[in-house]
Amino acid sequence: MDAKQHLMEIYRQNPCRALPNALWKTITPGDDLRVEIEQQDRALTSLAVWQGDRLMALWCENLEDHPLSLTQIDRVPFALVHSKALPIFEHRRFPHQEAYFRLIHKDDPPVYNCPPGFTYRDVHPQTEVNRVTKFIKSCYENIKVGESIVRGWLAHPVYDPALWVWVIDEAVNEPAALGIGELDHGVPEASLEWIQVLPPYRGKGLGKAVVGELLHRVSGFVSFTTVAGKIDNPTHSERLYRRCDFSGRDVWWLLSS
């Protein structure tokens, strides 16, 4: 079993602990991926995933089990570190530090119908890239998502147009919410990447409706669905996912020089 296959097996057992985001974002063709795994009595004690000098994931059961050298700790320019391993870097002062939640959904999809006056409508990604881009920008302040970035999502190996969905305000026939998910048949896993509700429509249950619809669309095709996001997100996205029966306590830190 090569490193990527071994990492996939570990990921399938506990995805939110193993990696800070969906597996396909770490395992991509042509990457110089190095995986360091320590086990004791077949139980995982530490995991480090490297791409060049960038530490793409670090987890350890106990701090004394971590696999990093003092030089690596002192010099790594970029690291994604599970909260259990974060004290390893306590003497470093990274200019950029952000905490991300990581949650999982394994159960049957919840039933959240659209509120009265709203309906689901499929996005047509190939022809609606500009509309999707403008919509996302309308939901955030100072977000750097351009049309070329959104069009690039269509080239992802996990792109599935069936997981792009609008919630339409029937009164004006315009989008009020948007959901975009991705599907990795190799794991098999779905990940929710973008869940947006326009500010005037928030608090009406549209976020739950979008999440429930995406979970319904992947039901029967995946072993689990994962999501990640900033802990201090002003839209309180973690609270939304927990209301939709996502669970977990894993926190990952992005550290960069």
Image (cartoon, rainbow, N blue to C red):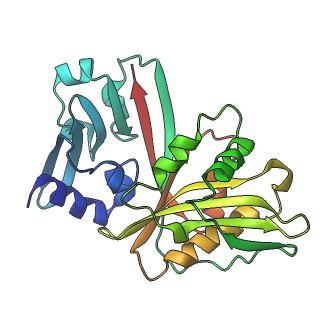
Q: Residue at x 59, y 34 (%)?
A: 144
Q: Residue at x 21, y 56 (%)?
A: 7
Number of residue marks: 0
Residue furthest out toward the left: 1
Residue furthest out toward the front: 127
In the rendered image, residue 148, in percent from the top left (x then y), is placed at: 52, 41
In the rendered image, residue 243, in percent from the top left (x then y), is placed at: 66, 64
User: On the rendered structure, is 81 left or right of 54?
Assistant: right
Q: Residue at x 65, y 49 (%)?
A: 130
Q: Quadrant of the C terminus?
A: top left
In the picture, residue 202 is in which quadrant?
A: bottom right
Which one is in front, 142 or 14?
Answer: 142
In the rendered image, residue 180, in percent from the top left (x then y), is placed at: 57, 60
Residue furthest out toward the right: 171
Q: Residue at x 83, y 63 (%)?
A: 204
256 is higher (above) or lower (below) than 201:
above
Q: Quadrant of the N terminus?
A: bottom left
Which one is in front, 170 or 57?
Answer: 170
User: On the rendered structure, is 231 left or right of 75?
Assistant: right
In the picture, residue 40 is in which quadrant?
A: bottom left
User: On the rendered structure, is 36 left or right of 223?
Assistant: left
Which one is in front, 67 or 244?
Answer: 244
In the rendered image, residue 157, in percent from the top left (x then y), is placed at: 36, 59
